[in-house]
Every structure is written in structure tokens, then in C-alpha cells.
Image (cartoon, grey):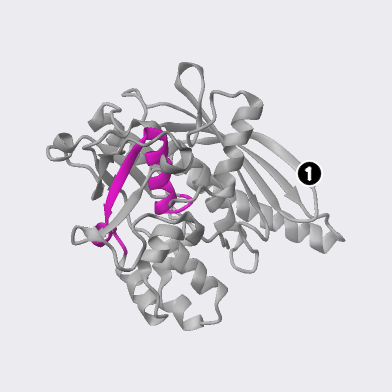
Amino acid sequence: MVMVTKEQALVKKIKAWSGSTFIGDDCAVLANGMLVSTDTLVEGTHFRLDCIDWRQLGWRSCAVNLSDIAAMGGRPRYLTVALTLPPADGAATEGQMQGNLEQFYAGFTACANLYQAEIVGGDLTVGRDVVIGVTAIGVSHEAGMLLRRGAQPGDVVVVTGDFGASAAGLQILLGPDQQAREKYPQLLQAHLEPRPRLCESWALVRQTASRGALMDASDGLADALYQIAEQSNVDIDVDLAAIPISAQTGEYAASLGLDPCQWALYGGEDYELVATMAADLWDTVELPFKKIGVVIARPATSGDDSENQPHIRLLEGGMPSSRFSGVVDLNHCFKHFC
């Protein structure tokens, strides 16, 4: 059975405690189609300063927030940045911190400018570790927006890019193998400087007239499939062989004796898009997506909540995969960051 993660369970409780009708997608949808999302990156949990430089950290902090806007098919407009920084200890340390912050904002604004978003404010405070809190504000596409709950039986499941590269890059950064860092630069870049799929999401919303479902795969492909299936009250069949995995990811996984599909499904932080759309439309449009599966109707149950969990079947040649259980187990999802 698919297991709900602790984070998902807590979000549901927060939604109940707050009585909010806005919680449930990658962004809150406010009046006039305004989109708002907040993400926090904490040193030691989401990144390590011995594995990432300050310019890359700035880019990454911006990109992961813009990805939430992309997950709704929206257009980013404004960003606020709240920073918690360790106290300076002497002039040299203070000068070094200012240099680090200059690099941070160079990376952040480079990413923001690429997608025509602008920093409009923020906050500075002192704390033990570096904490980065970013709020992204955007607007919905003129053709509408796509939510997680829009999948329907018969839809095809499509994705952008490839999966597992970020987890592979993290593995390299945490390891001692300097040759791997030199041999697999694309994997390092995938983890350190992800590219939010804004252009792809705009194309999807425009071509589908906002009929379907959409979210990003920040917590892994398996998680995204589960979230869409749960909120749309459907099941999903996925062809493992169709999941796009780059040559570098596959080669590096093989060198470690690992299955790259584990990274693709459970690694997370690829910031690719996962969507569903009508099958007849998929056959007629040209979009920068790849088909990996189909949406199927969820069988009727006795009403027991334990029986009404969405099922994500991982298939090979039309049969349940021998490498994985017949349904996705989110307990495999690992949450290491760098």
C-alpha cells in the first residue's frame, strides 16, 4: 500500500487546524488568479556550505521557488528573500560574509531575471545556521491554470526532462570520488543549479486550455504521481522503461551497482513537471513532454479509508515490475540534500 509521508499527513492537519481553503497545491491561488508560494532552505537539512558555493545557493534558492509557480502553469512576478545568518565575528569575517552575500544575490538575480521575476523585499536576522526563506508571487496564465486534482481516467501521464540526476549529483557531492565530479558535470549541475520548467508549463496550459493536472516533482516522481492520484481520486499505471533517465545518471548508477529508477522515483529535487492530459489531445499537439503512463479509474471500495489509497502501478512490459512492488511505497523516499 502506498504510504502517506509524515509531511503530507502534517499538511493535512494544518489545513484542518487553520480552516484554510487555499492549501493543497504547489501555490495558493488568490483573487484574480494571483499565485503565492513559500519555501525554506535550512543549512544542514537542505544544503551544506562545503558542497555548494554561495552563487549556486542563490540560484538554487530562487529556482526551487519559481518551480512552484511553474507547477501551476503560472508566470512569476515578484520574490521576497528572508535570510538568517550567523553573527559576524570580527572585520574579516564580516567582510567575508558580505562577499558571500554578494555572490548569493548574483546567483539569485541571475535566475530571477531569466524568468522576468524581481526581488521586492525580504528580511535579515541573526541565527546559528543559514536559513533562506523565499516567497514567490506570480499570476496565472491567461489560458488558465492546472491543479493537482484535474486528472481523469484515460488521460496520459507526461513529464519534462529526466529524473534521478539531482539525486545522483548529491551522491557525488557527498562522496570522496573527485574523478566522478569531473566525469559527471551534468549531474552536479542538475542538483546545484536546477532549471524551473516555466516555459514548458506555459506551453502545456496553452495547448490543453487548462484541462488536466500538473505539479512539480520536487519530492520525487513517485510522490508527484501519488499526490495527483490522491487529489484526483484516480489510480495511475507507469511504464518504468518510459521514465526518462539521462545517460550520465544511468552510467553513474551502474558504476555503483544501483538501479537508477530508485533515484528517479524517490530521489527528489529534479524540479521536473509531472502532468496529465487528454489522450486524444496528446496525439495531436507538440509539447516538450514525454509520456510515461496512463490514468485509470480507481475501483470502488467498501468505504474503508485504508482501501481507498491511490495505487501507482510500476509496470514493465505491461506487467508489475519485478524490481519494485506493484504499488509505489513512499517509505523508500530519501530526503538528503546538499
Residue 171: % across, % down: 50, 71
Residue 214: % across, % down: 36, 38
Q: What residue do we see at 51% from left, 58% from top?
A: 331
Which picture quadrant has residue 136? top right
Could you say which is closer to the camera, residue 82 or residue 91?
82
Instruction: For label 1, count other residues whose C-alpha is less than 10 Å away and answer few (under 14), some (14-19) or many (20+).
Output: few
Above or below residue 172? Residue 194 is: above
Q: What residue do we see at 38% from left, 50% from top?
A: 272
* 114 left or right of 202 in image: right
The stretch drawn in magenta includes residue 227: yes
Which picture quadrant has residue 50? bottom right
Q: What residue do we see at 74% from left, 48% from top?
A: 84
Q: What number of labels is visible?
A: 1
Residue type marked 1: Thr
Above or below residue 294? Residue 53 is: below
Residue 13: % across, % down: 62, 35
Q: The C terminus is located in which quarter?
A: bottom right
Q: Find disc 1 in the rendering and name its residue.
A: 125
* 270 left or right of 292 in image: right
Above or below residue 94? Residue 37 is: above
Residue 160: % across, % down: 31, 49
Could you say which is closer to the camera, residue 332 or residue 247?
332
Magenta highlight range: 218-245
